[in-house]
Image (spheres, helix red, strand yellow):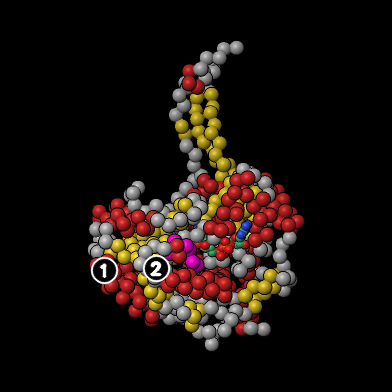
Amino acid sequence: MSDLKQRSLSLLSALGVDPAQLAAGPLAVRSPVDGSLLAELAIEGPSQVTGAIGMARTASLAWRDVPAPQRGQLVRLLGEELRAAKPQLGELVSIEAGKIGTEGLGEVQEMIDICDFAVGLSRQLYGLTIASERPGHRMMETWHPLGVVGVITAFNFPVAVWAWNAALALVCGNAVVWKPSEKTPLTALACQAIFERAARRFGQAPAQLNQVIVGLRETGEVLVDDARVALVSATGSTRMGRAVGPRVAQRFGRSLLELGGNNAVIVTPSADLDLAVRGIAFAAVGTAGQRCTSTRRLIVHASVKDALVGRLKTAFARLPIGSPLEAGTLVGPLIDRQAFEAMQAALAAARAEGGTVTGGERVLDHAFPQAFYVRPAIVEMPAQTDTVRHETFAPILYVLAYTDFDEAIALQNEVPQGLSSAIFSNDLREAERFLSASGSDCGIANVNIGTSGAEIGGAFGGEKETGGGRESGSDAWRAYMRRATNTVNYSRALPLAQGVKFDV
Ligand code: NAD
């Protein structure tokens, strides 16, 4: 048994996962750290998924009648259990998804933060009171639970994205069925065990209020097609969203799509280059470029391009690349061979389009022959080509020079995706223009801070091929509820709206 398998089994057992689940079937789970086999899980077939949805439906019927502030108490306990489990769950994220230690722990912290947020929210599911045009009438909105929420997640945020969805869905009175990425099901089983501990302590949660279904795309498709799933919240590639969105719409279900990004940073002549170097480097190479918000494009004014790109090349050349389980590592592995090959194909295509590539090569292949570590690449491009417009889920930073600010904004917006964006500038006019209606077209637009590492208090998501969904903070909770408009007549007359007369 490999060291990592032993370590992950002991973490899973400490987190409360039944070991019988870990050697039960054909889904081989491998660690990107060294490629070793961690577990072999059973895959849920269509009848098991359908059964899980049925149980979730039953749970939702009981849960919707529990007052929202009480529902919040379950999520408070979930937050407490996550606090207690943070070191183990964070390490398991590092083993299964390849994140460096602080990022694995940071992901669990994000789960704790959204639980705190959702507890407060459980007393703030506000509807409006609306002025009625009729005398003796009152109008208001009430918000009700949807029923069953299906959550489909990607490998790169294997636990936080479930928590963003589940914490809000639960305080909003729904039951959750979660299909994690087939590349990271172990952390999902750990979250389920943590949830069940919280539910036991809470004491009055209906059975099967949150369930995990392990499987491949086909498993997710059953969730997508089932009319009892009122909302499908799906995080992953645009390719996945293109398949899921129309299928859910076909049955008039709701979908919340969080898809690919192609995030740019604009650096203007007045920028603080010290800040810019740090902000860009973290966002471009953190999580080995495998965040939906990773910086993939640098649009820099020609007058500062050489200075900035020179400093970035020096920083990239010095990056400590290695096992994410070792202290000091800043860049861990790509998730698998397929991700490595996609990166190499993108670099070859960029070269063919006139790009100059620095870095991008495989490293540590002797130490880790079954894993894929790369030096992050900087690619200076003559223009924004098709390769640059495409999201390659790897640490590649394309550099484009501009001379006119309008041109910079046009380049920033001229990609199919619209997730995150940033400007480094000390010029108030440029910064405000970037945030204005004629500035960035993304769901996230930042000033003097990189594109990744969002806080949970804001609504998270993006436009265009990113899917339009919003999760996490602000009023994102509304996606998990249905709105009813109520008109109450407390008069003895029955006036009709718009002055219509209809006396019978
Ligand atoms: P992926 O699209 O390959 O898989 C994501 C999930 O969707 C998996 O659970 C997979 O089994 C499931 N799936 C795939 N096709 C499906 C279908 N037709 N029906 C139902 N389920 C289906 O993505 P990935 O490689 O795991 O993750 C990387 C991608 O996710 C990147 O594009 C990244 O930008 C994106 N992402 C976006 C966000 C965001 O919030 N916008 C967050 C994280 C990741």
Give the magenta part as a residue range.
388-396
User: Marks 2 and 1, how far apart in space?
Assistant: 16 Å
Residue at screen point 53% across, 28% down: 487
- Above or below residue 145? Residue 498 is above
- Tell me the amino acid under the disc marked 2: Tyr
Question: Was residue 395 drawn as part of the magenta stretch in this picture?
Answer: yes
Rendered image: mark on residue 304: 1
- Tell me the amino acid under the disc marked 1: Val
- Above or below residue 288? Residue 129 is above
The reply to whether residue 101 is in sight is no
The reply to whether residue 51 is in sight is yes
Residue 494 coordinates in the image, percent (x, y): 54, 18
Residue 210 coordinates in the image, percent (x, y): 64, 56
User: Within 10 angstroms of label 2, few (less than 14), some, or many (20 or more) residues?
Assistant: many
Question: Was residue 357 drawn as part of the magenta stretch in this picture?
Answer: no
Residue 61 coordinates in the image, percent (x, y): 67, 45
- Residue 316, image quadrant: bottom left
Q: Are marks 2 and 1 in contact (CB under 8 Å)?
A: no
Magenta-drawn stretch, dominant element (helix, strand or loop): loop
Rendered image: mark on residue 10: none
Residue position marked by numbered label 2 in the rendering:
398
